[in-house]
Image: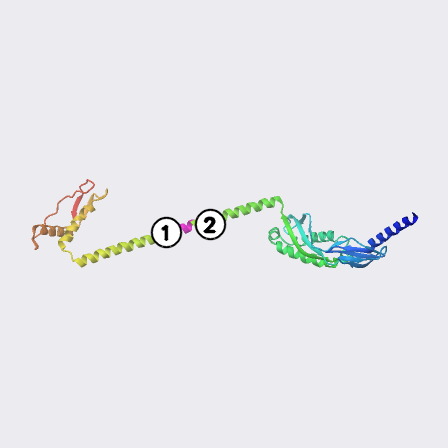
């Protein structure tokens, strides 16, 4: 019975010894080993053997890229306005030994360094430039943080500003300004549209007037050519002339009009045409004293 108990004790000691001797490190992790309190080496991912009770592996360190979101911090701009800025930091541990022994808490150290750098960068910029220069701020933060955290075994890959919140009064003023700018642009676009519409309408009227004038000119040319081509008799022209006289009396304001002297010649030609006389027959007959107009008035007739 005693032998069995001793055997069990020895087996348990052997298992404990094996467990303390063999260390398995997961992928993308690392562990620093101390021997009698001094740094000895860094365990790589996989199976590792250490001396039990002499070597003491420390806590695993994550070697993957990590994301840390910091709480919003108040920063004063160059024009003495307080803005709240919260940041997101992407970093990676490149040297497990330095991350464990060069700094007590590298995440807290990076956070404080980020706040300090933000205050230095934002303090040299006004609010408008701060809101429109995120890339510039990010690049400056990344440069400072990467340089300072290099000795801690940390590589800062990217720094992003999640939000830049100005005071409520400034937000209200900015909204009013943006609304005024939008209304101004809308008014300008409306005026420009109306101007273009008027220009196009005037251009259309001009083109229409030109086309009408060209059509009338072509019609006059056609009539003129037809008259000269057919060589009309003067009697026919005189008759047409007399047919146009009633048109002169049209309109509500035509109460007095003057008949030119050519009407006498036209009347003579018409008289000769109906009497069959083609020669001169003395003075022309006196035209009637009155001709009724189409509107019912009896306009006075004056011979020129």
Q: Residue at x 20, y 46 (%)?
A: 247
- From the image, tell me which residue sits under label 1: 202
Percent of width and height locating residue 104 = 77, 53
Residue count near mark 1 (Cα–Cα under 10 Å), binned few <14, some 14–19, many ≥20? few
Residue count near mark 2 (Cα–Cα under 10 Å), binned few <14, some 14–19, many ≥20? few
Q: Where does the magenta region start and end?
A: 194-206
Percent of width and height locating residue 126 = 62, 52
- Marks 1 and 2 sit apart, C-alpha to C-alpha, by 20 Å
- Does the segment drawn in magenta span residue 302? no
Residue 304 visible in rendering: no
Which image quarter: residue 101?
A: bottom right
Percent of width and height locating residue 151 = 74, 59
Q: Residue at x 28, y 54 (%)?
A: 215
Instruction: Of the two numbered discs 1 and 2 on the same chain, state the one appearing first in sequence.
Output: 2
Disc 1 to disc 2: CB gap under 8 Å: no
Between 108 and 207, the residue placed more toward the observer is 108
- From the image, tell me which residue sits under label 2: 189
* Main secondary structure found in the magenta portion: helix
Q: Residue at x 17, y 48 (%)?
A: 243
Element type at marker 2?
helix
Q: Residue at x 31, y 54 (%)?
A: 211
Element type at marker 1?
helix
């Amino acid at each position: 019975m005693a032998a069995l108990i001793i055997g069990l004790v020895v087996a348990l000691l052997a298992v404990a010894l094996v467990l303390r001797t063999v260390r398995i490190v997961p992928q993308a992790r690392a562990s620093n080993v101390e021997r009698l309190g001094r740094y000895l080496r860094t365990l790589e991912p996989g199976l590792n053997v250490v001396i039990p009770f002499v070597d003491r592996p420390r806590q695993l360190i994550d070697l993957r890229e990590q994301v840390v979101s910091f709480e919003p911090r108040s920063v004063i701009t160059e024009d003495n306005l307080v803005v709240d800025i919260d940041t997101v930091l992407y970093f990676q541990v490149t040297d497990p030994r330095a991350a464990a022994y060069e700094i007590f808490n590298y995440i807290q150290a990076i956070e404080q360094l980020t706040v300090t750098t933000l205050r230095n960068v934002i303090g040299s910029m006004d609010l408008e430039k701060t809101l429109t220069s995120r890339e510039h701020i990010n690049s400056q933060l990344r440069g400072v943080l990467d340089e300072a955290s290099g000795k801690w075994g940390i590589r800062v890959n990217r720094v992003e500003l999640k939000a830049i919140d100005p005071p409520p009064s400034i937000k209200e003023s900015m909204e009013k300004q943006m609304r005024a700018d939008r209304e101004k642009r809308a008014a300008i676009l409306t005026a420009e549209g109306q101007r273009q519409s008027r220009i196009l309408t005037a251009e259309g009227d001009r083109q229409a007037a030109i086309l009408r004038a060209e059509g009338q000119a072509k019609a006059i040319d056609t009539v003129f050519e037809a008259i000269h081509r057919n060589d009309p008799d003067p009697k026919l022209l005189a008759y047409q002339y007399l047919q146009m006289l009633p048109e002169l009396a049209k309109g509500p304001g035509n109460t007095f009009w003057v008949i030119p002297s050519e009407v006498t010649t036209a009347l003579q030609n018409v008289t000769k045409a109906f009497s069959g006389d083609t020669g001169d027959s003395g003075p022309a007959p006196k035209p009637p004293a009155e001709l009724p107009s189409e509107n019912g008035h009896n306009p006075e007739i004056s011979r020129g």
